[in-house]
Amino acid sequence: MSEEFVLKKKLNHVAFIMDGNGRWANLRGLPRHLGHKEACRRLIEIYDLCREFNIKYASFYAFSTENWNRPQDEIDHLMDYLEEFFHREIDYIMKTGGKVVVSGDLSRIREQTRKVCYEAIEMTKNNTSCVFNVCLNYGGRDEIVRATKKFAEAYKNGEAKLEDLDEQAFKNYLWQPEMPDVDLMIRTSGEQRLSNYMLYENAYAEFVFTDVKWPDFRRKAFIDCLKEYQNRNRRYGGLKNE
Ligand code: IPE
Ligand code: IPE
Ligand code: MG
């Protein structure tokens, strides 16, 4: 029987660093890319769990600006599986009111993957139940540098004033301005670092690290993370516990 769990703490935005695919495959004597294949199966399951727990925004780190350092063959497989994922699940995401958005520079992503992403974004753009943010060719520093350039451009054109720029207004120049700050950042596979993920948005996130590798990250593992989050005291520099 699947575990009952009621999430009582406010959780608008959960962000995942989906790590450990290669090690998952290695442990089974499989090629690394089959870890990525299995990983893509978890995406829709976790999306469903987010909806079940009424989490409105979910971000998934699928490919970092540093992942270009991997062998081309592995990158190609990753893109294949991402395309397969969208072909397989887009109707379901649409039916359940999910809205696909992408954070990251798609111009460097190969054409057919880019096309599938744009189609998913376009098809689901008016949906409101859960925002499914795929971070693709995403880097936190890259996002901040681009945001700075976008602001500079707007300033130069007289569309933005220096005195109006504050922490909130700066967010308008990030990839997904409508997404709230990350409340919970989960990294799988035991690594305890950010690897350039959502540096601006994670400023006050709770971090939960689990040893479970992403291809094994299912309902129970997710609920364990939510329980840990629920027990945290969020003080935001003050004294009250939220
Ligand atoms: C995460 O799994 C997926 C991506 C980075 C694209 P890894 O491929 O990093 O798996 P490990 O860390 O080598 O096990
Ligand atoms: C982070 O995982 C990027 C993604 C999950 C897409 P990595 O496996 O690339 O990170 P490092 O190399 O261990 O920092
Ligand atoms: Mg890794």
Image (cartoon, rainbow, N blue to C red):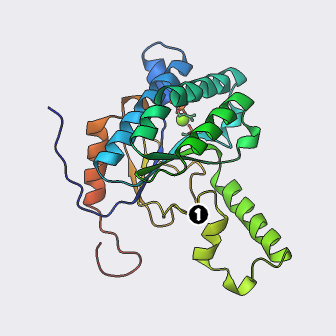
**Which residue bears the numbered disc 1?**
177
**Residue 40 in sight:** yes
Indicate the amino acid at tag 1: Pro
In front here: 160 or 61? 160
> Can you name the residue that lies furthest to the top here?
29
Horizontal and vertical percent position of residue 201: 53, 62
Dividing the image into 4 quarters, which one contains the C terminus? bottom left
In front here: 70 or 51? 51
Q: Which residue is drawn at 76% across and 65% down?
A: 150
How many marks the image carries: the answer is 1
Horizontal and vertical percent position of residue 71: 70, 25
Horizontal and vertical percent position of residue 59: 49, 48
Work out whether 150 lies above or below 214: below
**Whereabouts is ligand 3, in terms of quadrant?**
top right
Q: Is mark 1 on a helix, strand or loop?
A: loop
Left or right placement of residue 13 versus residue 164 in this view? left
In front here: 21 or 124? 124
Work out whether 179 lies above or below 51: below
Work out whether 90 lies above or below 59: above
Q: Quadrant of residue 190?
A: top left
**Ligand 2 within 8 Å of the CB at mark 1:** no
> Can you name the residue that lies furthest to the right here?
156
Work out whether 183 lies above or below 51: below
Left or right placement of residue 199 versus residue 226 in this view? right
